[in-house]
Image (cartoon, rainbow, N blue to C red):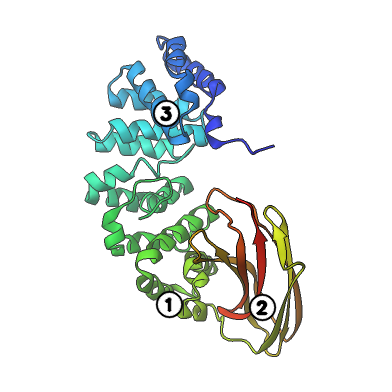
Amino acid sequence: MSAPLLKDLLDLALLQRLAATVSQHHPSFAADTFISTLWDSAYTELSLKQRVRRIATTLYQQLDLPFADCCELLKPVSSEIRGLPGFIFPDIVEQFGLGDFATSMQALAHFTCYSTGEFAIRPFLQSYPQQSMQQLQQWAGSDNMHLRRLASEGCRPRLPWGQKLPQFIADPTPLFPLLQRLKQDPEDYVRRSVANNLNDISKDHPDLVLQLAQQWHGRHRHTDWILKHALRGLLKQRQPQALQLFGCNIRALDASLTLAQHQLNYGEVLNFAAQLTLHDGPAPLRVEYAIDFASKNGSKRHKVFQWLQREAGPGTLKLQKSYRFSDLTTRRHYGGAHQLHLIVNGNIVVSATVDLIRDN
């Protein structure tokens, strides 16, 4: 049985619940018309974001209220329609609030507490850059963790599903005072966002992020966690400065990599084991494995996977892992030779080959 799609959270039952909730706060709202306008054969073919946009647009149009009045009406509604379906309310702000900055910021501050305003704030950062950054700084100092998280998540340069922010892709330094303010946040929810923001920046400006990491590292456990998560892309790329920051120096060791099979069919699982005999330590140990996937044109696609990270040694460590050669939305598997690598503290120490058989 396949997993349910996220878009199916915005189904007919959700439309009915939304219409009923709006009607409680606005008795003249035509709930049946709202549902019948949305629920048709075309709706079922829409993606998640397309459904959010269509619901938000229809709701705003059929409420037929001034923008500020609409936001006030929907604030109590948003506390009952939470989570991913709650994307609807910030989307109304994103579409129709650009001409009223103050009202929009007040609305997003409310809506984000029950869902998220990270997508809706982005057009405001483009149209009102100075005012928007001042607003994010204000939220960064809030007692409310949802607002602090929005301060970081809303300005991520390369937010997945969201509009890119080219001004911060080109020059991320205006973000640093904001992230500085949040780098010891007590909430994991906020710290994870700060790390993801820095990870976004590292894709375009690795040197700046490494410079910042050198300044921040070793001063607070929350900050150190943020940095390790923020530098995950650079660590997977085996960037020397990133590895050294966390003490991942070259280890004195013997290593072996054993495959349960050297040939398998598409859809089967490759089981493999590693043995490390560490001659030094105890010291930081970062173990990864990488696969050079065969591709359609004969080139190799190198993908690194985290395996283990801890203090270890001296002594012998035995590890086991498996990988299923089945297609994902982000990865297709082609027949041919695949190279498996064992990586210790950023260094490939041993490799092995497996052949994948696939007819099509």
Residue 303's place in the image compared with 109, above or below, is below
Residue 348 in the image, given as x and y percentages of width and height:
59, 79
User: Mark 2 highlights which residue?
Assistant: 311
User: Left or right: 59 with respect to 240?
Assistant: left
Identity of the residue drawn at 37% across and 38% down? 108
- Say which label, 2 or 3, has the lower sequence index: 3
Residue type for callout 1: Gln
Compared to residue 186, the image places residue 100 above or below, namely: above
**Tag shown at residue 75:** 3
Who is closer to the viewer here, 188 or 232? 232
Residue 157 on image: x %, y %: 35, 55
The residue indicated by pointer 1 is 214
Which amino acid type is shown beneath numbered disc 3? Lys
Quadrant containing the N terminus is top right
Quadrant of residue 324 within the rendered picture: bottom right
Question: In this view of the protein, which residue sits in the foreground, 189 or 159?
Answer: 159
Could you tell me if the residues under marks 2 and 3 are in contact, i.e. CB atoms within 8 Å? no
Query: In the structure shown, which secondary structural element does the residue marked by tag 1 occupy?
Result: helix
The earlier-in-sequence mark between 1 and 3 is 3
The reply to whether residue 141 is visible in this rendering is no
Ranked by sequence position, the earlier of labels 1 and 2 is 1
Amino acid type indicated by mark 2 = Glu
Q: Is residue 331 above or below residue 93?
A: below
Tag shown at residue 228: none
Q: Residue 166, image x and y in percent? A: 28, 55
- Can residue 102 be seen here? The reply is yes
Q: Secondary structure at mark 3?
A: helix
